[in-house]
Amino acid sequence: MIRNRVDIITLGCSKNLVDSERLMAQFRRLGYDVYHDSNDVKGAVVVVNTCGFIGDAKEESVNMILELAEAKKRRKIGRLFVMGCLSERYARDLRSEINEVDAFYGKFDWQGILRDLGKEYDEATGDERVLTTPAHYAYLKIGEGCSRTCSYCAIPIITGKYRSRRFEDIVADAKSLVARGVKEIQLIAQDLTFYGIDLYKKSRLAELIDAIAGIEGLRWLRLHYAYPAHFPYDILPVMRRRDNVCAYLDIALQHISDHMLGLMRRNVTKAETYALLRRIREEVPGIHIRTTLLVGHPGETEEDFEELKEFVSDMRFERLGAFAYSDEEGTYANLNYEDDVPEDVKQVRLDEIMTLQEAVAEEISAEKVGQEMTVVVDREEPDFYVGRTEYDSPEVDGEVLIAKNVELEIGEFYRVRITGSEMYDLYAEPIGREDKKGI
């Protein structure tokens, strides 16, 4: 254990990461040495920011807390605090089971950690962050919570209804990030497409995207996560017109059969979903769509699943992930449906969907061979520089492995020629800097 050291460990999504970064800034302001996701946790203060979305994520969070509780018993660490979604929902149960934790905080009351350490949370600098991402990109959260009523999802239970951040505050944060050297912003919320409705009584997402894209020095702006029902079509002309808004959209569709969309309470139909996707592709040529699908939801029949497979084959999503239904306490599905799809069937369906997608992804990657593309260089490995195109979000999508023919700078943008492909990754040779100044 090292005095004056704080270790913060973040589990789950990028929205949690932003909260951790804000907490880190507060600790650093107070003079602490702050470490994030260290492989050797030994702080006098340790904070775990937990995820509580589905079973696997909850298990990972609990295991991390138990591991750190054991470290505390051995006096390797000092005080142990738990915050985030799992703690928001299950603090009472966790408190009774894991005595080594000094205190539990929810998703939005983590400022209490400082007070319990005898320190003061500074509201005036509350939006400041210590970036844990590479210096050239960052996440920017535009709202909290979710006002959708999807049957399977516990997030509204954990976070409450959607709360948009003030338009001016978001733009100011974006300008601050770019001034610090950030060249790529990942715009995030549980539901981007609801932005502004609660606060301004109308969607202001298109206006927000346009304002952020207009910040001088911002090279890429990427959108996570959209919702298909009542989709704000006015964002599409902005995406097409603004060169620095990536031709990329993360939109979770979950299913396609009308039977399942109804049971899931998605407020959209199969026909509307197909029409939405066709219009997005038509208005933003070359766009890469990332989606998420859910298999094994209560009531899913073989016929429903066959429709879903046909959908994956028809739409040829450039990026796709899937997960199996997890029966989450307190959700509409948990209270009203029987979890009637056996676990082994869920796994078989999940494997089938991903096998289908692997073939699609391999074909799409192969189509890029021979093309010239712009990449940003994220890091250097022994054999390659590793970058991404505008069609690749950090952590979740594929990468471009760039030959080390010449020296490249991390965080800079280059033109490359694609020379080979795998299922998700591409191989490339560098051509020159994007700014035309040569390599």
Image (tube, rainbow, N blue to C red):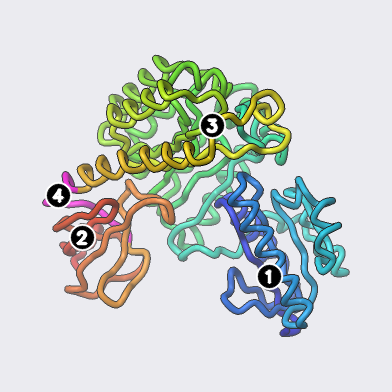
Image point (52%, 56%), residue name = 177
User: Which of disc 3 and disc 1 is earlier in sequence?
Assistant: 1
How far separated are the C-alphas under marks 4 and 2? Answer: 11 Å
Is residue 275 shown above or below 390? Answer: above
Amino acid carrying label 3: it is Val
Residue 371, disc: 4
How far separated are the C-alphas under marks 3 and 2? Answer: 41 Å
- Kindly indicate the quadrant of the structure image that contains residue 23: bottom right
Residue at far left of view = 370
**x then y, percent, for residue 361:** 27, 44
Residue in the foreground of this view, choosing between 361 and 190: 361
For the N terminus, the image quarter is bottom right
Say whether residue 233 is left or right of residue 279. Answer: right
Mark 1 or 2: the one toward you: 1
- Asked whether 214 falls inside the magenta stretch, the response is no
Amino acid carrying label 2: it is Tyr
Q: Where is mark 2, residue-wise?
A: 427
